[in-house]
Image (tube, coloured by chain):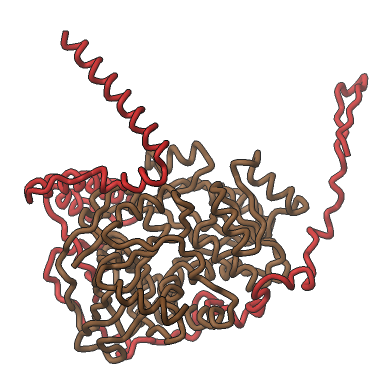
Amino acid sequence: MLAMNYRGPYRVRADVKPDPIIEHPGDAIVRVLRSCICGSDLHLYHGMVPDTRVGHTFGHEFIGEVVDVGSDVQTLKAGDRVLVPFNLFCGSCFFCQRELFGNCHNTNPEATAVGGIYGYSHTAGGYDGGQAEYVRVPMADVGPLPIPDDLHLDDAVLLTDAVPTGYQAAEMGDIQEGDTVVVFGAGPIGIFAAKSAWLMGAGRVIVVDEVEYRLEFVQRYAQCEVVNFREVNDMAEHIKKMTDWMGADVCIDCVGGDAAGSIAQTLTGRLMKMQAGAATVLHWCINCVRKGGNVSIVGVYGPTFNMVPIGNALNKGITMRMNQASVKRHLPRLIEHIREGRLNPKEIITHRVPLEEVADAYHIFSSKLDNCIKTVLIPPSAREVQAVSASALH
Amino acid sequence: MEHQHHHDGDTGHVHTHPLQGDMAAGPRRPTRAELAHIEGWGADLDRKNRPAIPMERTPARFIHPHEGQLPQQPENVEILVSTERPGITPIFGTAQPPKGLSGMIRRAAYKWAENDLRRWLMLLAADRVNVVEGIGEDLMHGKVPNVLAEMGIKAEWEHNRAGLVKKAVIAGALLGTAVYLMRRRER
């Protein structure tokens, strides 16, 4: 089969690899119909995630069609179209029983601090991901959700990560009516966090980024205020000025360790790898939020440590919540929002690229070329489906 | 209000700042009418509509049909396991087993706990060694890796031609200077 193949930092290509096989009686093999490049794939692409091995296939946002199932699988059969949450989870462990599906203890032997994630290095379990024609999907009775007939495939693929992660980011902010919410990052997660903040009754939503075309997009798409951090003297001072000198009620980090905006953080976190990514946005969140406010973190950082003003967090009495999104838990409500027209995820897709051109797709997304917001990769075996689906559902 | 200052014989240069006030009211909150134009505003204002609140579901429940009886996946390739758990998990990925020099470094790294910085630094080092091994593997299979294509040069040419030319000029200048200095040293 054709699959994305990681060759080193900033180097990927499409290669022929062996087809995946059933390795556990709970597995399914899924033929990929669409897969996305996620902002957190860029941490892998930039060589920031330890134990990212050459030959790895990335891709944790994908949908597809079941082609084979293991002997234990009861709920899926060949031909079913499924939406596969990015987290691999067993549905049985202590954490899954509490619906912390991003924290499963049975799917990642290589680390305890993170659950299994498709195509996200051996630190996240060593599973090849969905930027391929076929993918192994373990615990097929637990993770995948059959795609409802009325759900567009482009919406479905964005429900595997980007929409639920943005939604959970807002949810963890515990937004109350009228709250001022500052979202750092105008990428796909930030865009959906901003949309979700309104769903939860925010009074003001302010999105911060440095990329002008992304700010223009989110301003229009999420009806929010925007700030280009390159144009302000100091981020905390600016947010305080905007909020009658109180600070925001809720700050959300949708950026993670690839953040720009601080020379010291960029040098030590991104270039010298002396900390687990640049903690610029964590720093801003703690210093921009009001006393007693909430900070929500969904931006991805590495497993070591970061320099953050934790003393200010203590002195301000901030509540900080963070987690990988518990995707499956959110899906029924998010599908309802799409049906009711409150969310229209597929509108953020700017690029549809054949899997064969994965190297260019990564470069465009990473370097923010061609006004790229979200890239979908289409494997060669799925192009016919793409054409039929587009004509049937548009 | 602007800052004012005056000189006083005893205290020197004295600034008079605008008053902060007691800030008792907090910031002004928009009314519902002002927010009526926002698509979907308030649909999940009621916390009952937010699916993952509280974050830990109570009471806990199985969502797997076998209720905890997970068959064990057989180990057919080498899997490295964290020291912070008693053994191997019932399910695991088998994507790229450790091999070569990078594999040796990874095996050594996995002897340290996740809590230990050495583990992660060794894994990052192994990743870099693995990149060189990857080039060697390509060459052994008769394939010369097209590094520029792998880095997306086609997209750079299409969407950032000026940037690409600038980078090429800088790289050329650096390379030229290095060659010049090396030749000079040889003489």
Q: Nearer the viewer, residue A250 or A357?
A: A357
Q: Nearer the viewer, residue B41 or A394?
A: A394
**Residue A56 image point, x, y percent:** 24, 59
Q: Quadrant of the N terminus of chain A?
A: bottom left
Does residue B62 appear left or right of residue A179 in this picture? left
Is residue B83 visible in the rendered structure shown here?
A: no
Does residue A296 appear left or right of residue A232 in this picture? left
Is residue A256 visible in the rendered structure shown here?
A: yes
Does residue A108 appear left or right of residue B79 in this picture? right
Q: Quadrant of residue B182?
A: top left
| Colour brown belongs to chain | A
Q: Nearer the viewer, residue A98 or A323?
A: A323
**Residue A192 image point, x, y percent:** 54, 66
Single out the residue that lies furthest toward the front: A391
For the point 24% across and 74% down, which residue is it? Answer: A136
**Residue A237 image point, x, y percent:** 69, 44
For the point 14% across and 50% down, which residue is it? Answer: B104
Q: Colour of chain B?
A: red
For the point 78% across and 68% down, which residue is it? Answer: B34
Where B10 sits versus B89, above or below?
A: above
For the point 31% across and 62% down, which residue is it? Answer: A354
**Residue A300 image point, x, y percent:** 44, 57
Q: Quadrant of residue A252?
A: bottom right
Where B45 sits versus B180, above or below?
A: below
| Marker count (numbered) | 0
